[in-house]
Image (spheres, rainbow, N blue to C red):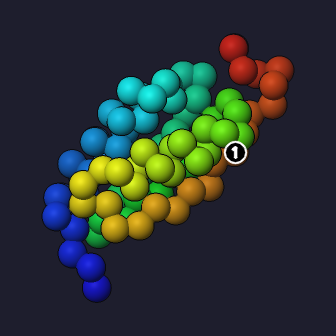
Amino acid sequence: MLKATLPDNEITQKVSQQLAGRGMRPPCRINVVTSKGCVTLSGMIQYEHQRRSAVQTARGVGGVQRVTESLQVMPSSQHWK
């Protein structure tokens, strides 16, 4: 088993901050959950290309061992509501 270099709550906080810094804030809604260094991203994004960016951003945070995502692209009619 791999050991995280940071506590899970710090990883979650850092990933969330990095995602917001990359423009993934409302109307995007990305939930970040970390368990033993494994990050799960779920929620809604505006565009398909944001999926790859979100995963790469999470992988770049120290202590992240693995990233799993189950992000959904919101219908275009809801992008700016």
How far from the left and from the top, in percent, is residue 22? 45, 29
Residue under the image location 35 percent in, 51 percent down: 60
Q: Can residue 55 be seen in this view?
A: yes
Number of callouts in the render? 1
Q: In this view, does 54 lie above or below 7?
A: above
Q: Nearer the viewer, residue 81 or 17?
A: 17
Image point (49%, 24%), residue name = 23
Q: Name the residue under label 1.
A: 72
Q: Where is residue 65 in the image (x, y as percent from the top left)?
A: 34, 68
Is residue 35 in sight in this rendering? no
Q: Quadrant of residue 75?
A: top right
Rendering coords of residue 29 (x, y %)? 55, 33
- Residue 67 lies, in percent from the top left, at 46, 61
> Horizontal placement of 61 versus 75: left or right?
left
The correct choice, above or below, for 9 with respect to 18 in the image is below
Tell me the quarter of the image containing the N terminus.
bottom left
In which quadrant will I find the C terminus? top right
In this rendering, the answer to whether 70 lies above or below 28 is below
| In the image: residue 55, left or right of residue 60 | right
Q: Which residue is drawn at 36% across and 36% down?
A: 18
Name the amino acid type tagged 1: Gln
76, above or below 44, in the image: above
